[in-house]
Amino acid sequence: MSRLTVTPESIEAYLRELTPPRDAALSGLEEDARANKIPIVGPLVGRFLHGMARSVGARRIFELGSATGYSTVWLARALPEGGEIHYTEWDRKRADTARRAFEQAGVAAKVRAHVGDALESLAKTPGTFDLVFNDLDKNFYPAALEAGVPRLRPGGVWISDNALWDGEVVSAPPRDEWTESIRRHNTAAYARPDLFCSLIPLRDGLLVGWKS
């Protein structure tokens, strides 16, 4: 699941009660994440991502940091026939887990997998995107914003996970380098004249920016 959550426990429990069960592909990735301590967004954020992709009519999506592909499945299922999502992960074992999940979920034909540095993969991939989802290691967040937003089409959406970082973004001074990087990312996103931003306090916080 996401690293931590700022959502009150009682509210999160209520949201989980409302959330329908996942199929074998997603529930299998959830079980794998629990067993191997792999950070994934979880079903609450997964449903949000799916809804956002559908709301903008996404046909091309780029993920910056995909782990075992849990968020990739949610996003891929929002794409129409002929749509594509770019999966990025440096760890080959996680990428193999993701590949099996894509086959099981029936979305393999929509996935373009990049094993290696996510920002380098973005730079090498031509064209613009309807949605970019950022879930890299947090020290890369400012660089991800600078690289990713110019690749969005007008009306496209930038989404970063962990934007509230267990509430540590309000600590003074910042607890560590990752906290400072998230704060810099959030401040820079809101300051961009080409983004209209809102920070959603769901689980560990989602910064959403609409490209003008």
Image: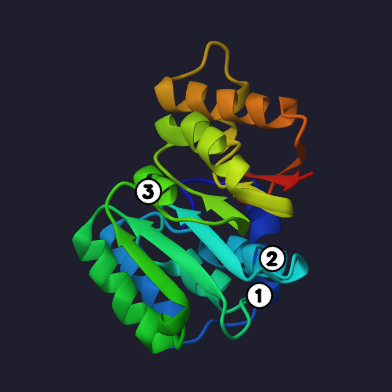
Residue found 26% across the figure and 63% down from its top: 94
Please, is residue 71 above or below residue 183 in the view? below
Kindly give the residue lying farthest to the left in the view shown. 93
Q: Amino acid at mark 1?
A: Thr
**Residue 131 locus on image (x, y percent):** 62, 57
Kindly give the residue lying farthest to the front in the view shown. 126
* Spatial separation of the CA atoms under disc 1 and disc 3: 31 Å
Q: Which of the two discs, 1 and 3, labels the residue nearer the N terminus?
A: 1
State the residue position of label 3.
Answer: 118
Tell me the crowding category of disc 3: few under 14, some 14 to 19, or many 20 or more residues within 10 angstroms, Cα based.
Answer: many
**Residue 111 locus on image (x, y percent):** 43, 73
* Spatial separation of the CA atoms under disc 2 and disc 3: 32 Å
Q: Nearer the viewer, mark 2 or mark 3?
A: 3
Q: Amino acid at mark 2?
A: Leu
Q: Nearer the viewer, mark 1 or mark 3?
A: 3
Residue 204 visible (yes or no): no
**Residue 185 locus on image (x, y percent):** 58, 29
Residue 146 tag number: none
Residue 15 tag number: 2
Residues marked 2 and 3 touching at CB (< 8 Å): no
Tell me the crowding category of disc 1: few under 14, some 14 to 19, or many 20 or more residues within 10 angstroms, Cα based.
Answer: few
Residue found 71% across the figure and 63% down from its top: 52
Residues marked 1 and 3 touching at CB (< 8 Å): no
Q: Nearer the viewer, residue 179 or 124?
A: 124
* Spatial separation of the CA atoms under disc 2 and disc 1: 6 Å
Residue found 49% across the figure and 74% down from its top: 73
Please, is residue 94 above or below residue 174 in the view? below
Q: How is the image coloured?
A: rainbow
Please, is residue 45 above or below residue 175 in the view? below
Does dot 1 land on a helix, a strand or a loop? loop
